[in-house]
Amino acid sequence: MSKTNPLLWLAAGAGAVWAVSRWRTGAQRDERFGDEHDEDDVEVVRDDSKGLTRKYDAAFEARGRGLPVPYLRALAARESGMREKDPKGLINVVRVVREDFNERHGTAHRPQHLQDPIVSITIAADTLRRIIESYAKNHAAVPNLREDWANRHFVELLTFGWNAGYSEKAGVGHVADYLERQGQTDITLAAVAKNAQAAGASHWLWAHPRKVAWTRSVADLYFTERDRDGVKAPVAVDGPVTHPSQVDPGPQPAGAA
């Protein structure tokens, strides 16, 4: 009878310790996500009574990793009220997000650096992209976890992951896996919040209705801003229309004269 190589036992033991450590790190990260985000009401800076300021649109476009400008605008509005000097920045970047970004990118951003809107937007957009990629990789069979900015369920699940934790260890991803194993693929914010406790997920997903309400408020604001961006103001015309040039023709097809 052959003897088991003690080195294999050591390697197996080390692997088990690493796996447990990684699981705990992921669960702790979700705990910190939920703990450090708040859902306080903030007074929002607006261009007028109807819409949010466009002051940061160029920065959202340049550093937003392809995320819709209306979404970043809505998130910033609900996080800081569109104020770059907020202690956590224009888009509130909590400590765990900043530390993860520094670790992954070899940067050394400190809390005071978040008051630079470029830094805030860069870190937030990078993390949101990470959440989107995690959802797509781990839940390809769930339509609402695939990037679709016209789908309110996707927007809410992304935002909830940003606010309360998204990982496969104890966040939205963990609850989605629990539901998928029960044959459910029509996964929504309401389904995640309802089943998070039974799934053994972080309490931030099920015991804090303010987080659910805050998430929905971001989605509401995003779709409002999205519609607002898509509506072109009519051209003012004095007197009767007597020539086509008096009417705004709207977007023209490529190659049009």
Image: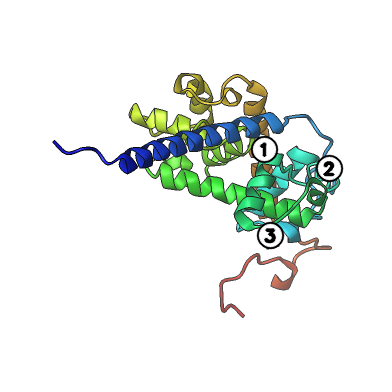
Mark drawn on residue 201: none
| Mark 1, secondary structure of its residue | helix
Q: Quadrant of residue 166?
A: top right
Residue 53: percent from left, percent from top:
81, 50
Q: Earlier in the sequence, mark 3 or mark 2?
A: 3
Q: Do the numbered discs 3 and 1 sit on residues whose CB atoms are within 8 Å?
A: no
Q: Amino acid at mark 1?
A: Val
Figure check: 252 above or below 49:
below
Q: At x 37% / y 39%, what residue is drawn?
A: 10
Which residue is depicted at the point 64% across and 21% down?
208
- Looking at the image, which is closer to me, 219 or 109? 109
Quadrant position of the C terminus in the picture: bottom right
Q: Is residue 182 left or right of residue 36?
A: left
Residue 254 position in % (x across, y down): 56, 75
Q: CA distance from mark 3 to mark 2?
A: 19 Å
Work out whether mark 3 precedes mark 1 in sequence or the reverse, and give the earlier one: 3
Secondary element at tag 3:
helix
Residue placed under numbered mark 2 in the picture: 86
Q: Compare residues 5 and 74 and report the one nearer the observer.
A: 5
Task: Write the residue at 60% across / 47% down.
Answer: 128
Q: Which numbered marker is on residue 63?
A: 3
Graded by Cα atoms within 10 Å as few (under 14), some (14 to 19) or many (20 or more), the crowding at tag 1 reads many
Quadrant of the snapshot with the N terminus: top left
Q: Residues within 10 Å of mark 3 (few under 14, many from 20)?
A: many
